[in-house]
Image (cartoon, rainbow, N blue to C red):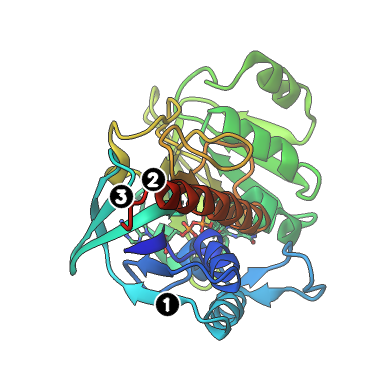
């Protein structure tokens, strides 16, 4: 029986693991792929404190993993397939058998939805981005496109006007889905140019983005737009397949917690991109991973004290 099982080995899970190992909780971290999570898909991270010249996503994760392992964190390569959260003892079913634990930190993260067009995969990290906060500053005085029409797309388009000389907002309908306030701001911005009823069929370029092939869905007219960056915001999905109906999530399926990362199920905590929140970044993920383990530690201590008082051994 473990004190704590951490599910997911991205920045949130690795930080949760570091805190658990240093607190001497009997812990295992389960990761279905190689540890790292989404940040492995980016070349360069410029906004994580402590690295004024930036750091590669790979190196940042390598350092986090080494630091956690230095304090004895056990990281196992397993996919969690099902959870039984009903009792005080939680059962974690994996592709290599089941494990029992008193507490769980969920750090299964999320992923940006792909547009699914030619050129997107090839040019991801080379002009195709899913995060303006991360990559916006690379496009100072350049023209970029934002694809999408919801709150995130419009917010990110507005953010990009701080750097880019022009932001082309490409939306497949004739009205935006974003809240009115954001729409008003976008319309008022001299730098934002909205292309209505337009879809992107292909992202062009060999070693970096040089443009987009577009089609107007009403007229059928095709065109080419020259841009150096393509920011895609057509949805962000939580890795929540395990959680169906087990605990409280928001309308988009992200896990709702209190400020101590406690979910609606006692003994289950969540941190990082899987949480319902506004800012999904490494800096927020690591803070929440730490807070989740801190809360889990208190929970396990109390539970053990309670069990001891009641004369239970397991
Ligand atoms: P994730 O990184 O998503 O990690 C979750 C982990 O859980 C994954 O490794 C996954 O394999 C594992 N997992 C999921 N389900 C299971 C399961 N059932 N069993 C076992 N393991 C499971 N942020 C920044 O701060 N700066 C940047 O420059 C930046 N650039 C980015 C660029 C891109 C292209 C993307 C996509 C994101 C970027 N981000 C950036 C955001 C940042 O990567 C995330 O906010 C951060 O990785 C979230 O960490 P996490 O640990 O919560 O989740």
- State the SS at label 2: loop
Residue 23 in picture, x, y percent from top left: 59, 68
Which tag, 1 or 3, sits closer to the chain's start?
A: 1
Q: Decide: marks 3, 2 in contact (CB < 8 A)?
A: no
Q: Which residue is mark 1?
A: 74
Checking the image for residue 90, the label placed there is: 3
Checking the image for residue 310, the label placed there is: 2
> In the picture, which quadrant includes the C terminus?
bottom left
Distance in Å between CA atoms under marks 1 and 3: 19 Å
Task: Pick whichever, 76 or 169, lies toward us.
Answer: 76
Distance in Å between CA atoms under marks 3 and 2: 19 Å
**In which image quadrant can residue 43 be found?**
bottom right
- State the SS at label 1: strand
Distance in Å between CA atoms under marks 2 and 1: 31 Å
Residue 131 in view in this figure: yes
Which tag, 3 or 2, sits closer to the chain's start?
A: 3
Give the residue at x 55% y 62%: 16
């Amino acid at each position: 029986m473990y004190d704590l099982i951490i599910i997911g080995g991205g920045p949130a899970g690795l930080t949760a693991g570091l805190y658990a190992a240093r607190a001497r909780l009997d812990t295992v971290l389960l990761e279905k792929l190689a540890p790292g999570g989404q940040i492995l898909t980016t070349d360069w991270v410029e906004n994580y404190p402590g690295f004024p010249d930036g750091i590669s996503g790979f190196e940042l994760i390598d350092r986090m993993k080494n630091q956690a392992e230095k304090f004895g964190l056990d990281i196992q390569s397993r996919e969690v397939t099902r959870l039984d959260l009903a009792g005080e003892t939680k059962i974690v079913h994996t592709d290599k058998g089941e494990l029992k634990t008193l507490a769980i930190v969920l750090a299964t993260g999320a992923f940006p939805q792909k547009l699914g067009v030619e050129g997107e995969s090839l040019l991801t990290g080379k002009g195709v981005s899913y995060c303006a906060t991360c990559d916006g500053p690379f496009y100072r005085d350049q023209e970029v496109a934002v694809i999408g029409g919801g709150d995130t797309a419009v917010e990110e388009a507005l953010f990009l006007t701080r750097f880019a000389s022009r932001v082309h907002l490409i939306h497949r309908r004739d009205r935006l889905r974003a809240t009115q306030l954001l729409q008003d701001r976008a319309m008022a911005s001299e730098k934002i140019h909205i292309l209505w009823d337009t879809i992107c069929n292909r992202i062009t370029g060999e070693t970096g983005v040089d443009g987009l092939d577009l089609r107007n869905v009403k007229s059928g007219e095709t065109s080419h737009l020259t841009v150096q960056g393509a920011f895609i915001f057509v949805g962000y999905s939580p890795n929540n397949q395990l959680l169906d109906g087990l605990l409280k999530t928001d309308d988009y399926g992200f896990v709702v917690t209190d400020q101590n990362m406690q979910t609606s199920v006692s003994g289950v905590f969540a941190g990082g991109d899987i949480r319902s929140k506004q800012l999904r970044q490494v800096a927020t993920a690591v803070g929440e991973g730490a807070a989740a383990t801190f809360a889990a530690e208190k929970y396990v201590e109390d539970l053990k004290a309670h069990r001891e008082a009641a004369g239970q051994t397991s």
